[in-house]
Image: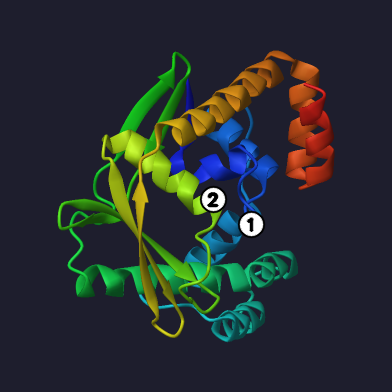
C-alpha cells in the first residue's frame, strides 16, 4: 500500500513549481520501504537542532543567525566542513520554513483557529494507495489551510495551482464541500480564498495520482530500474531520475 501525503500530490502530478517531482518520489519510496533517502533539507534541519542546538519552532531562524551559528559550530568543532555546507545551502529554506511556522502560530491565535494540525485524515484511493493529510485547522466550522507568501499579496494574484491541488486533497479526505485558504505575507497582508469542491477537477487529480502510483509499481518491480533511479536520487541528479522514470 503506497502512502501519499496531501502536501506531496501537486509535485507528484507535475503541478508544483517549487517542489521537485523526483525528490518527492524518493521520499515516497523511502517511506514505503523501497530505498533509504534523506533530503538535504532534512539533514540540514537535523544538524541545526542536534549539533547547533537551535530550535526551529521557538522563533524564525534567519539566514544571518544560521551563518553565525555555523561559524561558531566550526570553531567549536561541532560541525565538519561538509556539514557546515549542508546547513548553509539550506539556510534560506530553513528561514522560510521557520518564519512560516511562526506566522501560522500567530494566525491560529488571532483568527481563533481550532484543532491546529491535530487530526490526521486517511482515504484509500485504490487497493494499493492511501491519501493522508493533516489540515491546519477549523474556523467557524470550516477547514482552513494557511500559506505564508514571500511575495507581497495583492487581490489580483491568482492562487497557485499547487495550493488548489492540496486543498482539494483535504476536501476529499474530510468530505467537506468548501474550505478557506488564508494567505499571509511579510507585511502582514492577508487574503482569504474560498476553495469549493469540484467533482470534475478532483477526478483529474485522482487519475493523475493513480497513474503515478501505477508507474511506482512498475519501478519497484524492475530491480535494475529501481537501482538506477535510487542511484540518481541519492546524487540528487534529478534529470537522470527523470530519464529513468520515463523509461519505466
User: Which part of the image, by quadrant, shows the C terminus?
Assistant: top right
Between the residue at mark 1 and the residue at mark 2, the CA separation in whole angstroms equals: 9 Å
Measuring 64% from the left and 67% from the top, which residue is drawn there?
90
Mark 2 surroundings within 10 Å by alpha-carbon count, few (fewer than 14), some (14 through 19), many (20 or more): many
x and y, in percent, of residue 218 in the image:
68, 16
Observer-nearest of 124 and 163? 163
Measuring 67% from the left and 22% from the top, which residue is drawn there?
215
x and y, in percent, of residue 149 in the image:
49, 71
Observer-nearest of 130 and 29? 130
Q: Circles 1 and 2: CB distance less than 8 Å?
A: yes
Q: Give left or right: position of 235 versus 35.
A: right
Residue 192 seen by the camera: yes
Which label is found at residue 18? 1
Compared with 161, 177 (above or below) is above
Mark 1 element type: loop
Name the residue beneath numbered marker 2.
162
Compared with 211, 104 (above or below) is below
The colour scheme used here is rainbow
Amino acid at each position: 500500500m503506497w502512502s501519499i501525503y496531501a502536501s506531496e500530490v501537486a509535485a507528484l502530478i507535475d503541478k508544483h513549481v517549487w517542489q521537485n517531482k523526483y525528490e518527492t518520489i524518493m521520499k515516497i519510496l523511502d517511506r514505503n520501504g523501497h530505498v533509504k533517502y534523506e533530503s538535504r533539507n532534512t539533514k540540514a534541519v537535523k544538524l541545526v537542532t542536534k549539533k547547533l542546538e537551535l530550535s526551529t519552532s521557538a522563533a524564525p531562524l534567519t539566514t544571518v543567525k544560521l551563518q553565525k551559528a555555523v561559524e561558531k559550530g566550526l570553531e567549536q568543532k561541532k560541525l565538519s566542513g561538509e556539514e557546515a555546507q549542508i546547513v548553509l545551502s539550506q539556510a534560506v529554506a530553513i528561514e522560510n520554513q521557520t518564519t512560516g511556522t511562526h506566522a501560522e502560530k500567530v494566525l491560529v491565535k488571532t483568527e481563533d483557529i481550532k484543532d491546529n494540525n491535530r487530526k490526521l485524515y486517511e482515504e484509500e484511493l485504490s487497493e494499493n494507495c492511501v491519501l493522508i493529510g493533516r489540515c491546519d485547522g477549523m474556523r467557524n466550522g470550516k477547514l482552513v489551510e494557511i500559506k505564508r507568501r514571500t511575495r507581497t499579496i495583492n487581490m489580483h494574484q491568482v492562487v497557485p495551482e499547487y495550493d488548489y491541488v492540496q486543498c482539494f486533497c483535504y476536501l476529499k479526505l474530510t468530505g467537506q464541500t468548501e474550505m478557506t485558504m488564508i494567505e499571509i505575507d511579510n507585511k502582514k497582508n492577508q487574503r482569504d480564498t474560498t476553495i469549493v469542491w469540484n467533482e470534475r477537477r478532483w477526478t483529474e487529480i485522482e487519475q493523475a495520482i493513480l497513474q503515478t502510483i501505477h508507474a511506482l509499481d512498475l519501478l519497484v518491480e524492475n530491480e535494475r530500474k529501481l537501482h538506477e533511479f535510487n542511484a540518481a536520487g541519492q546524487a540528487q541528479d534529478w534529470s537522470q531520475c527523470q530519464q529513468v522514470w520515463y523509461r519505466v
